[in-house]
Image (cartoon, helix red, strand yellow):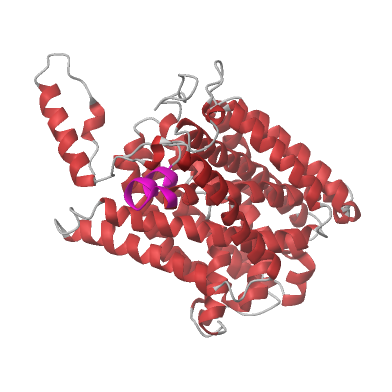
Amino acid sequence: MRSSSGRGLQPNVLNTFDTIVMAVAGSAPAYSIAATTAVLVASVGLAGPAALLYCAIPMLGIVLAFRRLGRIDINAGASYSWVGRTLHPFLGFLSGWALVVSATIFMVAGSLPAGAMTLALFDPSLAENTVLATAVGAAWFLAMLLVVLGGARLTVRAQLLMSGVELAILLFFILAALLHNGTAAAFDWSWLGFSHFDGASGFASGALIATFYYWGWDVTSNLSEETRNSRRTAGLAALVGVGVVFLLFEAYTVAVNVTLTAEDIRAGGSNVLGALGEAIWPGVGGKLLVVAVLLSTVATLETTLIQVTRSLFAMGRDRSMPAALGTVHHRWNTPWVAIAVVGAVALAMFVASTALGSVGDVLAAAVAAIGLQIAFYYGLAGIAAVVAYRRTLLTSVRDFVLGGAWPLLGALFMLWIFFESLGELSAASTGIGLGGLAVGLVPMIVYWRQGSAYYRPARLDAALAMETRESDAGSASRHPDYADKSLATDF
């Protein structure tokens, strides 16, 4: 794992707790609830809790897939490396490219609400000014860019502060919501069933949006080269992170159904949590939850920057993108060229976004487009895990279920909602989602023709990797200085 400069990312910087914090922050609970609830309600109505529940089951299959793949290939590129080494390098590149594009789009789509919410804390009327909200959002983005440039340790310290306050506020309002008498509707178990979906296409649309809610936990895989005992830690942190945000998402979506009418939700737009807070605690609650959303948004900008820059770093290191992207800063051990490139592209997109309409319009189109790309690369990673472990799946029921059936279910679900939702999306969302993927064909073909070694991969095979590690353990154990604890990690 060497960069083009001869330096790699700094290993063993993050521990298990740090990585769990990054997983939760990556899914951005407060931001996802605030920014996406209006889109989810517009798509499936009262079935929001059901969409989140039924998407969580296959999503756990994808988490298991990432966990198992990370045990046999520690790589900052994550699915970019795994899919390329199991299915085909072309699919691997497009998997990595989908993450790069979705993350870059999100950095704009996420920064705009951050700017609007910052302004709303001072004067709510200013939040509707798209140009001003874009400028403030860009300032937040640049601040997080500098934090990410400063290294993984600085990034985690910032996350501990932002996510700690965010989660404290969210938990307080969950308790407050339980004591509050809802005015919109009484809780109904049918919200967790299928009756409120408008057929298969309606379910697919809701699941696609729910996928966006959960997206971000896989930052733990992109940080694997910088994580202590990452063969175990990255996957464990992802499982814990998804479990935490699932409970938060369900609790708040139910609270929204109980407390706010459809008209209230539409009026809340990209800040439904603010409306919910105002209904629960008039005069104070709205502002407190706006602070939580703001912190969540800024925190997830940071984790998204890590994902896209580590992915580009891996591509630069493999010469499947310009080699300069694999350059590591001599002091901070961060891929500074990739960070600078992402910053320049995102700032250009900030300027372009001001011509696309209001903050809500930009966000609605972006969420669905990002959902397409997430479903694409998650689906490929799920299949990659099954292929990589194909020779071990029948060794036990546990291996068959956790290593084969569940990841395959998750993969098929993700690919199904990808294709099923195409006919339901707006032209803007479809164009952004598919057009972003299509652009990746250009660098893929260029660097394939140049002979990048990435397109001649060593196949990823769990059984072979296990045999190799057992052989290495046997040889090393006969050496008097043997002390390689990493071999204790099970598959």
Q: Is residue 335 left or right of residue 462?
A: right
What residue is at 50 percent from the left and 20 percent from the top? 5
**Horizontal placement of 324 versus 273: left or right?**
left
440 or 433, which lies in front?
440
Question: Is residue 175 visible in the rendered structure shown here?
Answer: no
Visible in this render: residue 415?
yes
> Which quadrant would the C terminus be assigned to in this image?
top left
Residue 472 in the image: state x and y as whole percent: 16, 28
Looking at this view, name the residue that lies furthest to the front: 449
For residue 281, above or below residue 331: below
Residue 266 location, quadrant: bottom right
In the image, residue 19 lies at what x, y percent? Answer: 46, 38
Q: Is residue 54 above or below residue 317?
A: below
The number of discs equals: 0
Task: State which region is magenta.
Answer: 78-90
**Splitting the image into 4 quarters, where does residue 180 fall?**
bottom right
| In the foreground, 333 or 352 | 352
Residue 461: image location, x then y, percent: 24, 46
